[in-house]
Image: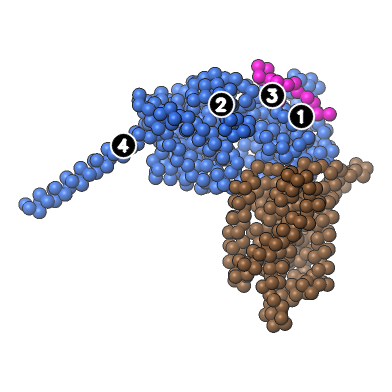
Chain colours: A brown, B blue
Amino acid sequence: MTILQTLVNGIVLGALYACLAVGFSLVWGVLNIINMLHGSLIILGGYLTFFAWHSYGIHPLLALPFVAIFIFCIGYVLQLTLINRVVNEPVLTTLTLTFGLDLILYNIMNVYYTATPVRVTLDLGIVQIGNIVMPVDRLLGMALALILTGLLYVVMRGSRIGRAIVAVRMDRTAAELMGVRVDRIYAVTFGIGALMAGAAGAVFSMVYPVTTNLTGAFLGKAFVVCVIGGLGSVPGALVGGLVLGIIESFAGQFFGPQHALTVGFLLMLFLLVVKPTGLTGIKGYE
Amino acid sequence: MLFGSRWSFGVRTAAAVAMVAVSVSAAAAADVVKIGAPLALTGPLADEGKKQEDVWRMWLEKVNAAGGIEVGGKPTKVELVKYDYQSDGQRAGQLAEKLITDDKVNFLLAPFGSGHTKIVAAVAERYGTPLVACVSSSESVFDQGLKNLFGTLSPNGGMTTAMVKFFKSKVPDLKRVAVLGRDDVFPRSMAKAISAAAKAEGLDVVYDQLYAVGTLDHSAALSAIKAAKPDWIYVTGYTQDLILARKQMADLGIKAPIITMVTGPAYKEFVEALGELANGVTSSSWWHHATSYDGVGVWPTTADFYKEFVAKHKDDPDYVHASCAAAMVTLGDAIKRAGSLDKDKVRDALVDTDITTFYGPVKFAETGMNQVRDLPIIQVQDEAIKVLAPADIKNADLALIK
């Protein structure tokens, strides 16, 4: 019984991990940018949702699309005006730029909202099947992760913009010659990554305390999930998140919570050595 | 000969200028008491750093408005030299060094938390600069034989034995305790202290684990705790960890008659971020404004401090505010008693400290820590903080969680 509960805990946690990693993975895969802003964007989404709820009584699920679109705009503008200038430089340059932007955003939030943890105290309750308990807000996070991932998959496969993103990822020069406006595609891609972060933040505001203290933890998780699942692949983020969630859950149960994170990192190191393309082994969006 | 006299003139002039400069700087030094503080004004600890800064400013304004501290019979203004160390421990150490060597501060105040206090204390010790810490309570910081470190919080151990005894007296069939602590200086030492105290009092510690810094999920630990069927769940960590842990307890349907979180309920944001879920959670704290002490300093009584704080900040002070304000009161008192800014004399005066402040008695033990005393046990009831013990300040009875 405990094992089943541990597995369920792991799956639900894994879905949250996938949720926070999908956008990060997309940006990394297509733009080859390690987006250090990702954690702060999630928290920004959390804050916007929290204040919409706290000041105007707007339900987080209602606020979610607006928050996501707003953060899409931030991402789009950032990429178009700043990151595009260095996007073709080595990865260290873009990393430094996003790191700097992260410091700015992080400290603005610290000054404006303070680091005091807040939370949308809206408890959606639990679903109980036999002895197995599942919190509704986490199931919601899971649904969101699946929907976002699915949507992204469809967009990448079916839409003009999706094909353009894939084309740019495969061969930037050729895509440019075919008339794809590469800078716009970059901006849209970064915007979608930001949108995913914002949407994750909206769901997280009901699960986690919203505080700038967590930006680093979220970013670190996104990183590990991507390495485990496979860099730059959306299904990879889903697989990586679920695997990490389940492993941490079982490790916490059997080795104690002190070692749960260690086991996750060990898996990452192991995969880096044995299978650097990650569990799914898919590269990009080919 | 001509050259010789010119040279000697030059040398004499230079010597005279140097002497004037020395006496000017000595006069300047005596004109103002310089207290240095590395503060976490940005980064994860920004809120805590701001609390320290707020009460220190309150104290400074009050002291300087009255002309300053009396040093050897002469009122001397006080200046606080502070730097933002961005919640980065290494930088706190570097800035402490800069404060001592560059800014030539007379005394130092420590930043928030046992970990960073330890780093700054090592620097202060190297330069023999007295350091007063107001938010460090782990014995592991004070048992290093440092001569210059003084702390206004009393040892963690004082919070645990009294709590176990209190709960045992209120709940006679209390038997099984589960302890979950954050693997970090203060939370770890509290978790260890409570499980030792519980065992010493004959309770069964049915779960005793630490979780790593950066843990984003407690479901595994909490599921194991649920299976152990404890009567009392004791969790330590920072506010964000505790909010998540309490939320997940509700998610997983975990109940126990007593749930203690340290130091969660000592901060109002814990209650705000949890709403109804906060109700029933107990904790201990080093101070609560329900206490009433009468002593020395710019705020002779607890009520004086409380009134002024609320008027200024429109909010209740917590133990961080009180302890840090008391650190300033204590340092000011020691300087006055020493009658000098000499570091050795003030250190000796700090050692001899035996005063009562609005915050409570301050008397440093051999280690430099404030003496052990009865600390308040608190509980959230109807989303407000109530004091359960000690008996002379209690304003509510323990309510078990149903």
Q: Which mark is residue B26?
A: 4
Look at label 3 and name its amino acid.
Val
Kindly indicate whether the residues beneath marks 3 and 2 are on one polypeptide chain: yes
Quick one: label 2 or label 4, which is nearer the N terminus? 4
- Quarter occupied by the C terminus of chain A: bottom right
**B397 falls in the magenta region:** yes
Look at label 4 and name its amino acid.
Ala
Question: What's the chain of the residue with tag 1?
Answer: B
Find disc 3 in the rendering and name its residue: B387
Nearest the viewer among A164 and A20 is A164
Q: Residue at x 58, y 43 (%)?
A: B46
Q: Which residues are magenta?
A: B386-402
Point out residue A104 in the picture as x, y percentages from the top left corner. Answer: 59, 55
Point out residue B32 in the picture as x, y percentages from the top left corner. Answer: 38, 34
Look at label 1 and name its amino acid.
Asp
Find disc 2 in the rendering and name its residue: B305
Say few, some or many: other residues with alpha carbon within 10 Å of mark 1 (under 14 / 14 to 19 / 20 or more).
few
Q: How far apart are the alpha carbons under marks 2 and 4?
A: 35 Å
Secondary element under disc 3, as helix, strand or loop, is: strand
Nearest the viewer among B296 and B185 is B296
Secondary element under disc 4, as helix, strand or loop, is: helix
Q: Can residue B277 be spotted in the picture?
A: yes
Find disc 1 in the rendering and name its residue: B382
